[in-house]
């Protein structure tokens, strides 16, 4: 079984998480500048034997599209074109940033570390991926 790659897409930087080979638990991997995301994904697909992509789907509280929805949809379309044999799943990402910030706070990270937006993006991608794993099983 291959691994799943979790992606919290952002216009400046993108959080990345990955599962174990059995797809049981999600782990934060990194945060990548979005302008180098395509090359990063092409590399990790080969190195880690990625079986599927899980991308956060931004929505407002009422379920309507956000300002980011168009960017994410464009990214998903590119993923499907570049990797037609790898399925792409979109998971509702409402509240993931808030949950990520609370998790970081609860883990005892000092104030300077909590202000690191890249850490929030990485933890958010982990939450998105773990939600997918929980839903799938």
Image (tube, grey):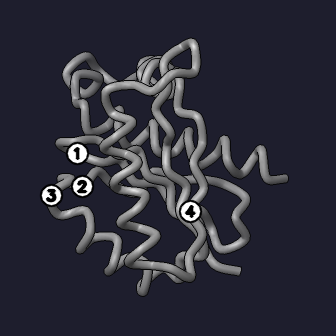
Find residue 43 and report its horizontal and vertical position in percent: 32, 80
Q: Which residue is drawn at 33% across and 33% down?
A: 68
Badge number at residue 123: none
Given the current orientation, which residue lies at the most extreme bottom position?
Answer: 46
Mark earlier in primary sequence (4, 2) = 2
| Callout 3–callout 1 Cβ contact below 8 Å | no
**Closer to the camera in the image, 92 or 43:** 92
Q: Which residue is drawn at 51% across and 62% down?
A: 5
The tally of labels here is 4
Q: Residues within 10 Å of mark 3 (few under 14, many from 20)?
A: few
Find residue 3 and report its horizontal and vertical position in percent: 60, 72
Query: CA separation, marks 3 and 1?
Result: 8 Å
Find residue 16 and report its horizontal and vertical position in percent: 40, 54
Q: Residues within 10 Å of mark 4 (few under 14, many from 20)?
A: some
Secondary structure beneath label 2: strand
> Which residue corresponds to mark 2?
32
Mark earlier in primary sequence (4, 3) = 3
Secondary structure beneath label 1: strand
| Callout 1–callout 2 Cβ contact below 8 Å | yes
Query: Which is more foreground, mark 4 or mark 3?
Result: 4
> Which residue corresponds to mark 4?
88
Badge number at residue 13: 1
């Amino acid at each position: 079984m291959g691994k799943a790659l979790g992606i919290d897409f952002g216009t400046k930087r993108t959080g990345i998480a990955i599962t174990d080979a059995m797809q049981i638990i999600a782990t934060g991997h990194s945060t990548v500048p979005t302008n180098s995301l395509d090359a990063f994904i092409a590399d990790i697909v080969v190195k880690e034997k990625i079986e599927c992509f899980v991308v956060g789907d931004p929505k407002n509280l009422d379920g309507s599209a956000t300002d980011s929805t168009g960017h994410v949809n464009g990214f998903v379309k590119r993923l499907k074109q570049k990797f037609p044999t790898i399925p792409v799943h979109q998971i509702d990402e409402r509240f993931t940033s808030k949950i990520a910030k609370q998790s970081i706070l609860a883990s005892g990270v000092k104030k300077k570390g909590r202000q690191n937006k890249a850490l929030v993006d990485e933890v958010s991608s982990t939450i998105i991926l773990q939600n997918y794993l929980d839903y799938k099983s």
